[in-house]
Amino acid sequence: MDHCQHAETALAGNSSSDFDPAAMDREIELIDQFYDQLSTSPDVASSQPGPGSRPASRSSAFQLELALDLLNRFRQEPPTSFRDWLSDLADRPFGEAQIVAGYGLAAVARGALDHVRADYLTPWSGRDLGHRLMAVTVLWAMADDELLANEALSIAISWTRQSGPERAVTAAIALGGPLGLRHPTEALRWLWALTLRDEPVSRVASLAIGQLFALEIECQRARNDVARFLLRKVRSLTKQGTTTLEQNRVLSVVDSVLEATKLGARMPTAAMVLRSRPGNFESFAEMWATALNSVPHRRRAVVALHLTLAALADDARGVELAAQLGTAILPRLTARTIEVLDLTLPDPQRTEAISAEVITAFFGAWQLVVGAL
């Protein structure tokens, strides 16, 4: 039994109750916005999480001062007063104050981990979304600390096991951020297992894998763990006996990766891969083509392609990159899929305009190759 199968077995039998699809859509939107806060937390674009990282939305000195102030509050105020103050903070719209509080509580955890876990993390992880996001922020801050990083991972994994859908969602969100970047193998193992759960949990787990991919692309020293992991899953679909359920599971996650955007912006991560990691694009194109060729997953993959081509329109190398994209993807597509793309790119009903030059380059490069054969 491999590691992923072990995680899936551990989660067998976990299921969530009936849910409100509209409410779930709203929660997914809020979680997506929360991931954008990564652009105002540790400088993930320049380094992996590690000792010495600090929040950076205003100035490191400013936020460090606030975090130390929170630590002093913990030492001086009665426990109930301190707990009520943090709970009130969790009820407010998420922003810099909550990020700083997460770092402050992580500092408290250095000397009182059991207390932080029992009085804050465990209760918060099963409450409303605001409290769950506060719990995630603390785990992300702990992931930056050599002394606490492994404990943060253990706490997140514990929430995936027989702890209810709320805590499973909290774990998925946490594993899709700096905690997952610190422990990519474990994060992917448990996130993949969570995609087996009922829709509320599986949707967040898929989103988290996409966000972990975006975070990995932005971190110059990070490896391509997500892309390699997912490519193995895509290639496994060619094995005899693959079920429709497994195909849907794999390609739904692929669509989430294709939809991932630059942290704090709406720039498709795929465009960043083209610009900064061209050597990795063949494997990325293979996953994209597989999703495009699957009718149930085609729409999301087409929208992601549209947004990526639109993002290239303002790039000085946009035409060149569009040609590379077409050359990598089009040979892998069925004739019907190419026909669909020809009809839907560009789509005049979409607000993102794609220049005719970029479209011509996307389709033209492959047509030149075919004509030369």
Image: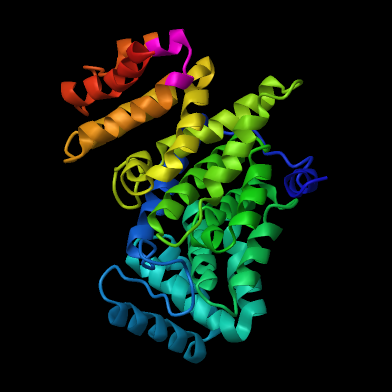
| Residue 350 visible (yes or no) | no
Give the vertical position of 14 relative to 308 (above or below): below
| Image x and y of residue 138, in percent | 51, 68
Decide whether the magenta segment is chiefly helix, strand or loop: helix
Does the magenta run of residues contain 335? yes
Residue 70 as seen in the image, left or right of residue 138: left
| Image x and y of residue 107, in percent | 50, 81
Q: In which quarter of the image is residue 56?
A: bottom left
| Image x and y of residue 191, in percent | 62, 47
| Residue 116 visible (yes or no) | yes
Q: Which residue is drawn at 67% across and 49% down?
A: 189
Q: Which residue is drawn at 36% across and 81% down?
A: 64
Farthest bottom residue in view: 76
Please report the bounds of the magenta region as a residue range. 331-338
Q: Which residue is drawn at 34% across and 84% down?
A: 65
Q: Which one is nearer the viewer's eye here, 317 or 353?
A: 317
Q: Which one is nearer the viewer's eye here, 78 or 165?
A: 165
Does the magenta run of residues contain 140? no
Q: Which one is nearer the viewer's eye here, 35 or 328?
A: 328
Q: Which residue is drawn at 30% across and 82% down?
A: 61
Tell me the quarter of the image containing the C terminus: top left
Give the vertical position of 242 relative to 94 (above or below): above
